[in-house]
Image (tube, rainbow, N blue to C red):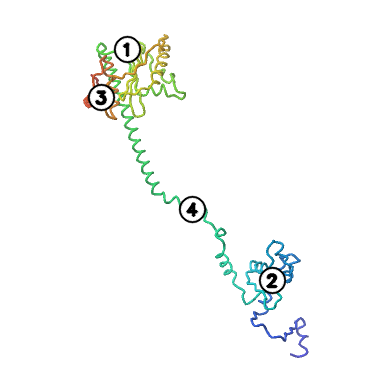
Amino acid sequence: MTASTPAFFPNRRKRHLDASPLPRHFHGPQSHTRLIQRLRRGFLLLPPEARSLAFDMGNYISRAFGRPSDDGRGLFSRWVRKRQGLTVAMDEEAGTGLPFVDRRRVTDPTKVTLEAEAVKPQQWKKRVPYYKKAYEATTQYNRRLEEIGIDVKFQEEKLSEIWKSDKAVKEVINLYLELLKEREKREPKRFLKCHFFNTFFYKKLACGKNGYDYKSVKRWTSHKKLGYELVECDKIFVPVHKDVHWCLAIINMKENTFQYLDSLGGMDHNVPRVLAQYISEEVKDKSNRVINTSSWHEELVDDIPLQQNGWDCGMFMLKYIDFHSRGLPLSFSQEHMEYFRKRTAKEILRLRAD
């Protein structure tokens, strides 16, 4: 290089090589500068009194956090490790007690993070969301829920069949009651003058929106429809349906009594009270007469034939009506039900009751 070199390169900076030998582990000027810059940025986060490397001698940070005195070295080591992911060593051999960064032990930040996660307490680790735990807990009941679902479906189908059969039974009962009325008109001298309410009457009367509801059945018994008035009848028959059981209520106009017949021997005192209120309003509305039903007797007919199974209540009720409309005593029993069932089916097919 000649003496005129600076003229050609006026902005060239001269570099003076240090005569001292290179460090044993030299990472080059660039890596050395980056490391110093990282440490400087870290030191600037400390208070002004603690930015010097000698701050450990006054125990500045240790005393601020009420920790045991360790000349600040341990706390500084932990702080540098968290901030920069570096390994801090202490110069014990020099006796100065000053911390410095050992560039030979700089570790990978990812590896440091993984090692720190491994030693974290259990409560610091990421927990499984509660909804996932709840879902996993419910999966063990899936089989039981499926069994319950199948059972519910079976019961619904069974109830649907019962409802259909119950609807069919009501149609059969109502048809047979019409045949009994036709029989009376055909042979009036042989049978008592009766009125046969259908299976919907009592529920309509007693189970309205506000309970008892005479207006809902007021037009059922007009003289134009019946050709007579209820006050002219000897007996009025009212089928009462108790969910899956059939009973019979009789308004005996001749004897001034309310009779209740249950083939299982039960009694519902509400039925006679409802019918007493009904017949009073009915007679007053249709005949403009006043009758005092408070003096009428409420009779539980207990000397009647009783069923011995769980399905013949409808047949018993029809035979109660049949025998009472003839003015005959109830001289039958469970053993006659098979014969009465076949006879009733035959009369329905012929559309004529004998």
Q: Is residue 159 left or right of residue 210?
A: left
Q: State the separation of the CA atoms marked 2 and 4.
A: 45 Å
Q: For mark 2, what is the residue?
A: 39
Q: State the separation of the CA atoms marked 3 and 1.
A: 25 Å
* Of pointers 3 and 2, the one earlier in the residue sequence: 2
* Of pointers 1 and 4, the one earlier in the residue sequence: 4
Q: Is residue 247 left or right of residue 72?
A: left
Q: Nearer the viewer, residue 110 or 180?
A: 110
Q: Residues within 10 Å of mark 3 (few under 14, many from 20)?
A: some
Q: Position of residue 354 (x, y in %)?
A: 23, 19
Q: Amino acid at mark 2?
A: Leu
For discs 4 and 3, the disc positioned in front in the rendered view: 4
Disc assigned to residue 234: 1
* Of pointers 2 and 4, the one earlier in the residue sequence: 2
Q: State the separation of the CA atoms marked 3 and 2.
A: 108 Å
Q: For mark 4, what is the residue?
A: 133
Q: Is residue 150 left or right of residue 68?
A: left
Q: State the separation of the CA atoms marked 4 and 3.
A: 65 Å
298 w.r.t. 118: above or below: above
313 w.r.t. 4: above or below: above
**Residue at 69%, 72% in the rendered image:** 37
